[in-house]
Amino acid sequence: MISTSLLDELYERAEKDGVALRIGTIIDRGGEVLLLERDDSGPIKATLKLPGTTVEPGEPLDAAVTRAVATETGLIVTRIRCHVGSFDYLSPMGDPVRRLHFAVDVADTYPIRLSAHSAYTWAPLNSDLRVTPSIRRILEDYRKLAETRTPSPETSR
């Protein structure tokens, strides 16, 4: 489980760096990750997204993670397992943004109730995913973490 001190450090670092925060979450169902799809009627398919949100001013990161998953998928976060990584970018308005990514556990992986997306898919981590290069790197880092993770006593029985 992720420590409160790490969450505080990530928040403080973003404030010091003068970047807005966004959250991305990785929900893993036996080697498949939940990806969201926007309604796309154009000739080029849009990239798939991880569930996420903008962190509200003063909002604790753990609360933002829980809210992101609940709002976008209807699922309930039971644990934030780890911080997988982050990347910085400029918003469409030219403002600096840092997107923090966390692997989470959820109470159940169904039913999924979408709010801002038209569809979802459970995609194998080892497949060629239709995501941005930045998200591809985050998912590759997550895959490596998942491979090296030692099973907990409950899962090794």
Image (cartoon, rainbow, N blue to C red):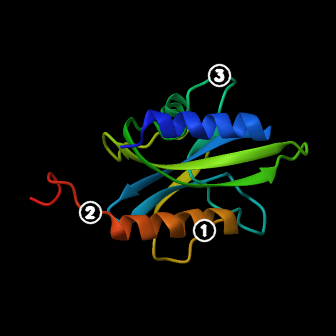
Mark closest to the chain's N terminus, 1 or 3: 3
Q: Residue furthest right?
A: 94
Image x and y of residue 116, in percent:
63, 40
- Give the numbered dot on residue 46: none
Front-lying residue, 116 or 63: 63
Say which quarter of the image contains residue 33.
bottom left
Work out how far the residue at label 2 is from the one at label 3, CA to CA, in angstroms: 34 Å
Asked whether, in this view, residue 69 is left or right of residue 116, the answer is left
Q: Nearer the viewer, residue 150 or 154?
A: 150
Q: Is residue 32 visible?
A: yes
* Residue at left offset 66%, top offset 41%: 22
Q: Outermost residue toward the left?
A: 157
Is residue 76 toward the left or the right of residue 36 in the image?
left
The kind of secondary structure element at disc 3 is loop
User: Of the residues shown, which amino acid type is indicated by label 2?
Assistant: Thr
Which numbered tag is attached to residue 150? 2
Q: Residues within 10 Å of mark 3 (few under 14, many from 20)?
A: few
Question: What residue sits 46% from the left and 76% below the top?
Answer: 126
The one nearer the camera, 104 or 42, is 104
Badges 1 and 3: C-beta atoms under 8 Å apart? no
Dot 2: element:
loop
Q: Which amino acid, by three-letter code, is at mark 1?
A: Arg
Residue linked to disc 3: 58
